[in-house]
Amino acid sequence: MSKNWTLYSFGGASRKDILAFGFFRNARAGDANSNTALFPDGYTPQLPGKTVDYSLFAGVNKKSENGWNIDFSTGYGLNYLDLYANNTTNPSLGGASPTNFYVGRNTFGQSKTEATFSKNFNDALGTKSINLAFGSQLRVGNFKLSEGDSLSYKIGPLAASNNKAPGSSGMPGSAPADRANESRTNVGVFVDIESEITEKFLVAIAGHYENYSDFGGNVSGKLAARYNLAKNFAVRGSINRGFRAPSLQQIFNSQTTSTVQAGVIRQSKQLRSDDTRLKQLGIETPKAELSWNYNVGLTAKAGSKFLFTLDAYQIDVQDRIIIS
């Protein structure tokens, strides 16, 4: 835009069509997933989907006369997934069941706005150089789960009288009780200092504070160092403390799927983390993950074209987020 100001932008859009298959459903009259009125020889559910993704970001950066690199940017990205179940049936509806269903949609969108500043100071405080960087970021995320066709999750009359499974077999639809529209705001600030203390010795330290609207504040950081034993050979190491709050999808997703248990196809339900039934089972609300990452390694250069690295690392995770 001028000698020192630059405007930049990037983005993208994509659509993908996917197709998966469920387990074969037998035509046995006593099978909970059979529907001989519509599929006298059994059936294999087809599970197509359509996912759309788009994003657009823009920003400006400047290098000031006194050497500061300044960058401001903002943008938004969104992805949604529509799911279907075809060549299948709602067994609890018997012959009144359709064979194609719309299962539902899940959507995640996130905006991000950030500002960063950095500058390199040569020969500062008796060192070869010190690079200072700091900045802030604001993220706002939103997760939505929308229900499918009413017959994709309906409990028909044969569920009680004939023990037939409800919902579209292979992928039961999301019901009104599964509906979600949840948001989160997250603000973070960081500072990073990297210094070549001498020609051989480099040290880096970084600190990061962020505050979640639903998980409170946290401090994490990193300490790293590298020492050149020779011109083309160096050892390095680092220690990091990490933090990851459960994603909105992990907390609020609610989905019914089919699994095979003891040779029988059964429906299983993934519950929202705030479902009251979980507390009755003694399952706590998910906590944020805390982690420590330790790394040590070496790097070497042979000639002008060969670079060799060897690293060993260990990551310890506390309160890891999993499906239980």
Image (tube, rainbow, N blue to C red):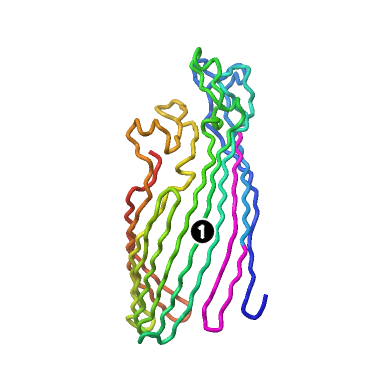
Q: Most prominent secondary structure in the magenta stretch?
A: strand
Position of 58 compared to 309: left or right? right
| Residue at image location 45% in from the left, 50% down from the top | 213
SS category of the residue bearing label 1: strand
User: Badge 1, how many Cα within 10 Å: few under 14, some, many 20+?
Assistant: some
Of the pair 146 and 316, the residue shown nearer to us: 146
Where's residue 134, x and y in %? 46, 70
Task: Specify whether residue 248 is painted magenta.
Answer: no
| Residue at image location 37% in from the left, 64% down from the top | 221
Of the pair 73 and 106, the residue shown nearer to us: 73
Q: Amino acid at mark 1?
A: Leu
Where's residue 275, x and y in %? 42, 34
Q: Is residue 309 shown above or below 318? A: below
Q: Is residue 290 shown above or below 148? A: below
Q: Quadrant of the N terminus?
A: bottom right
Task: Specify whether residue 83 is painted magenta.
Answer: yes
Q: Which residue is mark 1?
A: 138
| Residue at image location 35% in from the left, 54% down from the top | 290
Across the whole image, how many numbered discs are drawn on residues? 1
Q: Quadrant of residue 4?
A: bottom right
Which residue is farthest top? 161
Position of 310 compared to 172: left or right? left
| Residue at image location 41% in from the left, 87% down from the top | 123
Q: Is residue 130 shown above or below 46? A: below
Q: Quadrant of the C terminus?
A: top left
Q: Is residue 250 shown above or below 129? A: above
Where's residue 68, x and y in %? 52, 78
Where's residue 191, x and y in %? 42, 69
Of the pair 60 and 310, the residue shown nearer to us: 60
Q: Which residue range is magenta in the image?
A: 58-85
